Image: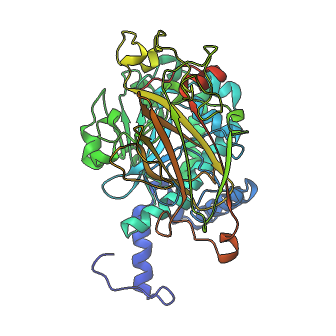
Amino acid sequence: MAGRSSVDLDNPTPEQKADAIASLREQLSDELNAYCNDVSLSAAMANEWYEWRKSAKIDDIKIAESDNTYPTPYPIRGYNFVADANIVAGPQIKEIQLKMAKYFGGGCWHKRDKEGHPIYIERVGLVNLKQLFRTCTSAEIFEFHFEMQEFLNRSIFKECTQLAGRDIHRQVVIFDMDGLSIGMVSHIQAINMLREMLSKDQLRYPEYMHRTFVVNAPAIFLTLWKLVKSWLDPRAISKIHILGKNNYKELLEHIPAENLPAFLGGTCRCSHMPGGCVPCIAKSNIIDLPRKAFLSLRHQTQISYSEPRHTYSFDFSPYAASEDGSSSAIGSPTTTGSGYASWFGMMSNRSASPRRSTSSTEKTPFDIKFCVVYLRFTADRGRGVVVEVLWRAFGAAVDSGFSDNNNDVLVYPETLLDPQRAPVLLELKVPNRAGNLVFNWRVANFDEGQAPFPDAKEARVPIQLEYSIDAEEDLLKEFNLPPVLRD
């Protein structure tokens, strides 16, 4: 509509109505235009869409938005209406979300393209179809899919539209096919579900696709593509780009390098989040803690708008052993003879585990530059909590609050997170030297995030903050989990 005069939406002229209809027609697929040419078909489609939303209770789905505390349905990076988040097994998270995060390869809404469209990335080549269909019903998978589409429509498109200053109602999708096998391509149940899902989306969520990139596509994918093409209209097919192994040049033509994960040819790593840009349990790049890991956290405190800060610190020696040779939790009362918390559970004559080795050669503890520590925390209310973690050399002053002390090593920079939506799990790389570890929490300021600020009455209610701090070694042992594999 550039160059045209503004339209009075309450009293449009016949010419303006015709112009609006023509503009809308340009955005519709050939199939939808055919429906529009036939009034009875058009009415039938609209009625079917409405009846479906009503019978499936689509409008009752609880979607995370800036003015509520519902959890996000899938990992997300780079938006303002919610903080960056992974799917963490708190009580707010549904079983289907945990199963999809575990078996559906690994995905994430990750920032925006050069035109302002949201980017959705899915590592399809790593989908565990056997476990997915063994543990999830078709109805559960469709319900999850519709929740994802509603989250995209009601929340993500809304923010992208605000940032772009124009209507954004389509997304860019990247399907990473690395790992795709012939067994996946020939899985009849999966193929039938894919066909049904595409059919439903073209009618219930039409024109949501701006571009789709299929990357790292092996030769076997072409067999599946021939079949899928027959289910799509020509307009949709024209938006799908099939790229070969490690061919990311076309991605960078449309997506800024800083918004594209490094494993797809960009420069982004999202190192502040466990799993990086796209957490993937199938690749073991993130720890998969069970629900019980978040049911009873070790420390409890309160923060409020009148007392907005909380600091917790303790001295430690990374590889000191407890008297009986066993490890103990970080920040627990158990100490070694030297007075330092024995938090990593490794004696100096023990070899480091392969997951912390910098090469295939096994290292001793003193060869390791960093130790891995996890912070788990929740909040019962609020509009977000800002977290900062510092490592401080012995002898430096410990103050209560956020610090720029020259003796500090910034382990985790000030970051706004949403523990009121679901538990937060942070992976921290701590220097492999004895020192003081300082954790700072504070209430989000007025200019941080998009959540509405509480009224005077609500602001007087304190925020209950619960947290635990543990060495990776201890968590893996406690919950019998496989090693975390990091790049």
Quadrant where the C terminus is found in the figure = top left
Give the x, y percent position of residue 54: 73, 60
Q: Residue at x 64, y 48 (%)?
A: 378
Residue 3, above or below 407? below
Residue 205 visible in the displayed image:
no
Choose between 215 and 182: the one closer to the eye. 215
Give the x, y percent position of residue 471: 55, 28
Q: Is residue 361 left or right of residue 153?
A: left
Q: Residue at x 59, y 50 (%)?
A: 72
Residue 435 visible in the displayed image:
yes
| Callout count | 0
Q: Name the residue at the right extreme.
A: 55
Q: Residue at x 60, y 64 (%)?
A: 307
Indicate how the structure is coloured in the image: rainbow
Choose between 446 and 434: the one closer to the eye. 434
Instruction: Name the quadrant containing residue 463.
Output: bottom right
Give the x, y percent position of residue 159: 47, 63
